[in-house]
Amino acid sequence: MTPEALSADRLLLAPARCWLDGAFAAGMGVLVEGGRFAAVAPLHSFEGLEPLRLPGHALLPGFVDAHTHLTQGFGKALAFGEPSEIFRRIWVPLESHLDEETVFLSAKLAALEALRGGFTTVVDAGTRHETGAAIVARATQEAGLRCVLGLICNDAGQEAAPVLARAEAHLARWSGMVRPSLAVSIPELGTDATMARLAALCLEAGAPFQTHANEHLVAVERSIVARGLRPVEHLHAAGALNPAALLAHATLLTPRELGMLRDAGAAVAYCPVATQWKGNAAAPALLMGEMGIRFGLGTDATRADAFRLMDAGEAVSRVAYGLAQGDFSQGAGWTWLEAATSGAADAAGMGAVAGRIAPGLAADYLLVDLDVPELMPSRDLAWELVRFGNRDQITAVVVDGVPRLWRGWPVGWDGRSLMREVAARVEAAVAKAPIVKLHADSAAHRSAVRRGR
């Protein structure tokens, strides 16, 4: 098998196993035509077509990152050990001080990392760079990554009319591999009327309305002091909760707020690695699922590795809830595989485009090598991939029917050249930003501990 073999306009794939409707099936054929899945049926039913046999490989839908920040790649290692709301001390200063070239390099590097981690679609929450949205779009298009592109529409302390005009232009501009989305960074940075209008525009356009909500205790308390309402309550009171709403994190939720999300049809981007690294709580993901609240897994730009993201989803849920409840299952594996594929696509408004291997959807898929010691013997492949799967098993990443990654490196462009460009620019870009880091790096911390300080 070669990347060229996957490039044909009409292709019958014959994997050893195929993830379909929540289970792995054997003996299936998947017909790809014109960049879309045309048919899925038992292989023997495709008479007259020569299949591309893929022994020892599973065919999975490409993973969908329900929440990330593509222009934070230059500072991803600056967040280690930092307390809450690092966006105030690190991300806003960094992103707002990037120039157009470094915005592009950061976004394309993040796109490459996403592809290497098995993601074929990412939901970008919007960059703080003034004109960065179009640059991010160019970077993902060049990388071959599907992107739901956020535009930050904060209007607190500003005139609403220009913000809404930009929002409507953004919704009208993007289609195809880049889909639009509107965002308010956190509810307190948007006026009620504007947030309600943005959510309505997104619902009409079939695009997600993104915001970070109930992530940190300090933000919840600040909202109560300012409004007498918690952030999700604030969104509800403003009329900004509807089926287009996609709330990142949503970890600190009361039963009342859970009911608001359920009744509004809103979705949650559950970010378990962010909880592990910098959060104040773990989202009650399994409870959300039982209540019918849609949720998908998001990286929050922590690390772009879908297998480790699923593992974190299960592990965080087990530690935060399962231990106290005596629940050893915590979703039985399939929950997290669905949350990283079809669930995340649905939460992002992309359920009719990606996230499943089904006729009519875009041919976004992975070929995953199963002939590895970690999967021997194999008895429950879905759960095994959540706990044992690794990105080095990804032989190919295909987006829109086009091979984008082969054995970890891009097809058609030079990933190592990009890394050299980043290396030449990253230190100066970080140095000029007024970043405030509160935790020492690992070596300095060790030295201080050894000195007893």
Image (spheres, grey):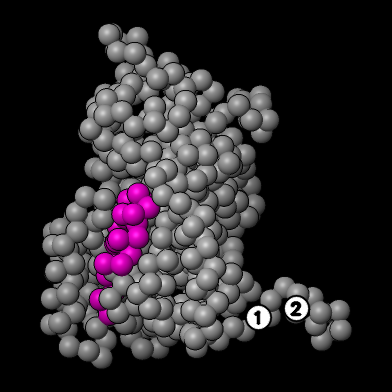
Q: Pointer 1 and pointer 2: residues touching (CB < 8 Å)? A: yes
Residue 249 is labelled as none
**Where the C terminus falls, by quadrant?**
bottom right
x%, y% of residue 101?
A: 38, 72
Residue at mark 2: 445
Q: Can you tell which quarter of the image residue 59 is in?
A: top left
Q: Secondary structure at mark 1?
A: loop
Between 359 and 108, the one nearer to me in the picture: 108
Give how far across and how far down residue 218 sits, in percent.
Answer: 49, 81
Q: Is residue 63 magenta?
A: no
Q: Is residue 263 visible?
A: no
Mark before the other along the chain sequence, 1 or 2: 1
When asked about the image quadrant of residue 154, the answer is: bottom left
Q: Which residue is painted at 58% across and 74% down in the image?
A: 78
Whole-angstrom CA distance, mark 1 to mark 2, is: 8 Å
- Residue at (35, 9) in percent of width and height: 44
Amino acid at the residue labelled 1: His
Report the span colored magenta. 134-154
* Vertical placement of residue 436 versus 86, above or below: below
| Residue 74 visible within the image | yes
Q: Is residue 138 magenta?
A: yes
Q: Which mark is residue 439?
A: 1
Residue 434, position as x, y percentages in the image: 50, 88
Specify whether 302 is left or right of 139: right
Which residue is farthest right? 451
Q: Does residue 122 appear to the left or right of 317 in the view shown?
A: left
Q: Is residue 244 above or below residue 23?
A: below
In the image, what residue type sits under mark 2?
Answer: His
